[in-house]
Image: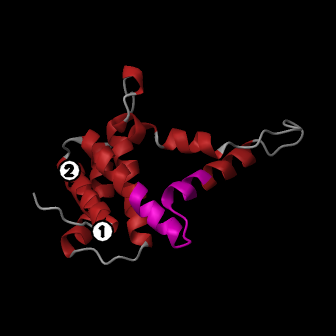
Amino acid sequence: MKIEEYPKLAVAERQLYHAVDLYLEGQHLLSVITLAGAAEEILGKFLNDHGEKHALAESIENLCELYRDAYGNPELFPEPPEPDESEFAKLLNTARNGCKHYDKGKPLSVDIDWEAYRLLQRAIRNYQKLRVVPDLDFGLKVPQVRRVFGQRHS
């Protein structure tokens, strides 16, 4: 048995590359969710360690802002509740967590293509924020993800 070391950034990069390939092929979208979710988490923690905000945190921040705007009229909501960031995180990670946890056999009910696309976008955003130079093939595929999603839903 040969044990090798794999830098976490390289692991996340491979997961992301494979997730993009599967998504563009329209295959194994549950695996796309798992691979993109794992890559997004590793890349997000890497960003955190370097003092940068990751895509999930940005999404949660945007949702909290929308929530505050919705409850912002003191005449309608004299004591508005504060948004719960952990609830937004749980909501945004429903598909990712549903693909990797047993959860007492509860079925996963999601729009699989939308969730795969959304997790890919978050993982790609984190990857781009790291300013890593991707291989040429991957760099050409990233814009195709949005186009393919649009074609599937037009």
- Residue bearing the label numbered 1: 7
| Residue 124 percent coordinates (x, y) | 37, 62
Residue nearest the observer in this picture, 139 or 11: 11
Residue 111: tell me if it is visible: no
Q: Is residue 2 left or right of residue 34?
A: left
- Label 1, residues with CA under 10 Å away: few <14, some 14-19, many ≥20: few
Q: Quadrant of the N terminus?
A: bottom left
In the image, residue 120 above or below residue 104? below
| Residue 144 falls within the magenta-colored stretch | no
Disc 1 is placed on an element classified as: loop
- Identify the amino acid type marked 2: Leu
Which residue corresponds to the image point at 80% horizontal and 46% vertical from the top-left?
72
Q: Is residue 81 visible?
A: yes
Give the extent of the magenta segment.
41-60
Q: Quadrant of residue 107?
A: top left
The residue where tag 2 is placed is 22
**Residue 49: in magenta span:** yes
Disc 2: CA contacts within 10 A as few (<14), some (14-19) or many (>=20): some
Most distant residue in the front direction: 1
Using the image, determine if residue 24 lies above or below residue 50.
above
In the picture provided, is 152 more to the left or to the right than 72?
left
Q: Earlier in the sequence, mark 1 or mark 2?
A: 1
Question: Could you say whether the residue bearing mark 2 is in a helix, strand or loop?
Answer: helix
Q: Position of residue 54 (x, y in %)?
A: 51, 62
Is the magenta region chiefly helix, strand or loop? helix
Count every numbered label the image shows and give the total.
2
